[in-house]
C-alpha cells in the first residue's frame, strides 16, 4: 500500500514519469496489488509511450483478477501501433480470460 500512496502523491504533483516508475516497481514486487496496475498502464500510453504501456499491461495480465482488462488494454495499445496480429492475439486472450472466469463481461476500466 505504501507504493500506491507514493503513486497518488506523484500524480497529484503531475509527475507522471515518477508515477510510472513506482507502478513498474509495484508490478514487479507485489502480486497482491497488481489489480491496481491496469489503469496506471494508461499513463505511458497517454504520453505516447505505447511500448511502455504494453509492457505494463502484459505484466498485469499475469494476474487473474485483471487478466481480461489488461489483455484488452494491451490489444488496444498494439492496435494503436498498427501491430494487428499482436492486437488480435491479445483480444483472444481477453476472450479466453472472460470465458475462464465465468464472467459475461469484465469490470469496466478506462482503455488506451
Image (tube, helix red, strand yellow):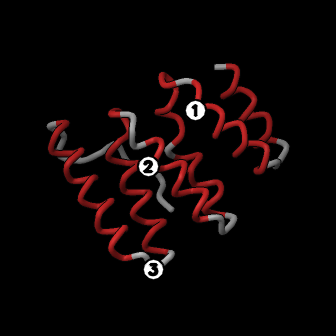
- Which residue was labeled with disc 3? 82
Of the image marks 1 and 2, the number of the one nearer the N terminus: 1
Label 1 to label 2: alpha-carbon separation: 22 Å
Is the residue under label 2 in contact with that under label 3 (CB below 8 Å)?
no
Determine the residue positioned at 29% across, 68% down. 88
Classify mark 1: helix, strand or loop.
Answer: helix
Name which quarter of the figure residue 65 lies in: top left
Q: Does 55 sit left or right of 18 as displayed?
A: left
Q: Judge depth for marks 1 and 2 and give the one in front.
A: 1
Label 3 to label 2: alpha-carbon separation: 22 Å
Q: How many marks?
A: 3
The one nearer the camera, 5 or 56, is 56
- Which residue was labeled with disc 2? 109
Determine the residue positioned at 33% across, 59% down. 90
Is the residue under label 2 in contact with that under label 1 (CB below 8 Å)?
no
- Give above or below for 10 relative to 93: above
- Which residue was labeled with disc 1? 28
User: Which residue, as the protein is rendered here, is positioned at the far right?
Assistant: 13
Of the image marks 3 and 1, the number of the one nearer the N terminus: 1
The N terminus - image quarter: top right
Label 3 to label 1: alpha-carbon separation: 28 Å
Classify mark 3: helix, strand or loop.
Answer: loop
Image coords of residue 31 (percent x, y): 49, 25
- Give above or below for 11 relative to 73: above
The local crowd at label 3, few if under 14, some if 14 to 19, many if 20 or more residues have their Cα within 10 Å, is: few
Of the image marks 3 and 2, the number of the one nearer the N terminus: 3
Classify mark 2: helix, strand or loop.
Answer: loop
Amino acid at each position: 500500500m505504501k507504493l500506491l500512496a507514493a503513486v497518488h502523491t506523484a500524480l497529484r504533483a503531475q509527475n507522471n514519469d515518477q508515477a510510472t516508475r513506482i507502478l513498474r516497481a509495484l508490478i514487479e514486487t507485489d502480486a497482491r496489488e497488481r489489480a491496481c496496475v491496469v489503469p496506471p498502464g494508461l499513463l505511458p500510453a497517454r504520453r505516447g509511450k505505447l511500448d511502455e504501456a504494453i509492457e505494463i499491461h502484459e505484466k498485469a495480465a499475469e494476474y487473474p483478477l485483471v487478466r481480461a482488462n489488461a489483455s484488452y488494454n494491451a490489444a488496444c495499445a498494439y492496435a494503436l501501433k498498427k501491430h494487428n496480429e499482436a492486437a488480435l492475439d491479445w483480444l483472444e486472450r481477453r476472450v479466453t480470460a472472460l470465458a475462464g472466469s465465468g464472467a459475461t463481461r469484465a469490470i469496466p476500466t478506462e482503455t488506451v
